[in-house]
Image: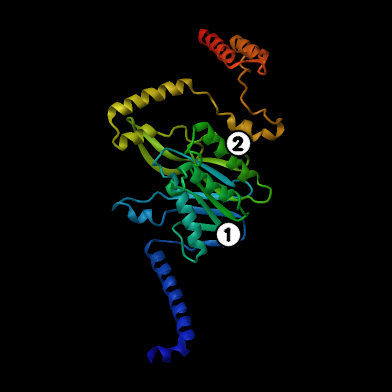
Amino acid sequence: ELVHSLQKHIMTIQQNAAVIAKLDCLCSFASIAQKNRYVKPELSKENVLDIKLGRHPVIEQELPLGDEYIANDVYLDSKEQQIIIITGPNMSGKSALLRQTALIVLMAQMGSYVPARSATIGLVDKIFTRVGASDNISSGESTFMVEMNETASIINNLSDRSLVILDEIGRGTSTYDGISIAWAITEYIHDHPTTKARTLFATHYHEMNELPRVKNYNVSVKEANKKIIFLRKLIPGGSEHSFGIHVAKMAGIPQIVLLRANEIMAQLEKSHVDFTGTGKALANRSSNKEGDMQLNFFELNDPVLEEVKDKITLLDLNTLTPIEAMMKLAELKKLLDHD
């Protein structure tokens, strides 16, 4: 009988519930803004994102008593600084900076005050994120495959008002594959004919800095007495070291493993090919013929390599038997070993 009598008032009850829910939400926004020193953001039609001393709304509440969250500025636009490449050591705060930027934009557009000193938010219609790492075991997809699927979804659905957050794209494959994919994605977003999506890209690849609207920043650290101190401040310029072994030490990896890792790293650094010009070469690709960017094995002016080249050129692959091919390969290997 009660339900029956209330049926004619259902519409009124639902409208009242909607108003109360909205008031409840706004009161929550007001309460948290006052409690945590949030500020009123300015929403703009310009394609700009200007956050002064932004903070992560969750992490700053979880800090130990007495610790203060290190706030950072972020500026993006479509004319001069469309893409920021953020480098820095593991655990330095790159991922937190990415997430806080996305959260500040989301909070502003849902009507909340934001954790910053000031914030001008150019309206965003899509927030794309590729962060974290996970396998999709049930469908047989690796971490890298999941990463590529999500990245493909982002670059296929970009708009001029998109905010793109990318964290360590390409880390699930080899170094050269990784930097190639990361650079190509950055280039695609930068050169897109109809959109200039504002993008934050955290990476360990330091070479991606040669496009006009791509700027390099790093989350700074201080090294003292063979220890690193995370300053967690975003500053202009790239980072030259990832301090991975230092982080491994902090995690409790045995000393014998760390010593061996340092030895191997020293050997690798000695034999490392300098690719600091890679970004410039790739950025100038439009003035080169297709294939000019490929590193040429025979451009080294080495007589032994020239001889190897000549021998390979003279081979007739149509008449070469498998045994003869093995013998030729052994001959070429012997030539290189003697060198």
Q: Residue at x 67, y 18 (%)?
A: 318
- Residue 19: percent from the left, percent from the top? 46, 78
Left or right: residue 171 versus residue 32 is: right
Mark 1 and mark 2 in contact (Cβ < 8 Å)? no
- Depicted 170 relative to depicted 123: above or below: above
- Depicted 87 relative to depicted 103: above or below: above
Packing grade of label 2 (10 A; few <14, some 14-19, many >=20) is some
Q: Amino acid at mark 1?
A: Asp
Is residue 124 in view?
no
Q: Which mark is residue 210?
A: 2
Tell me how many marks there are: 2
Q: How is the image coloured?
A: rainbow
- The one nearer the camera, 142 or 21, is 142
Quadrant (top left/top right/bottom left/bottom right) for the N terminus: bottom left
Q: CA gap, disc 2 to disc 1?
A: 28 Å
Residue at image mark 1: 125
Left or right: residue 52 versus residue 287 is: left
Mark toward the start of the polypeptide (2 vs 1): 1
- Depicted 144 relative to depicted 227: above or below: below
Q: Residue at x 40, y 38 (%)?
A: 221
Secondary element type, mark 1: loop
Which mark is in front, 2 or 1?
Answer: 1
Q: Residue at x 63, y 27 (%)?
A: 294
Is residue 320 in view?
yes
Q: Amino acid at mark 2?
A: Glu
Packing grade of label 1 (10 A; few <14, some 14-19, many >=20) is few
Place residue 23 in its image quadrant.
Answer: bottom left
- Residue 69: percent from the left, percent from the top? 38, 51
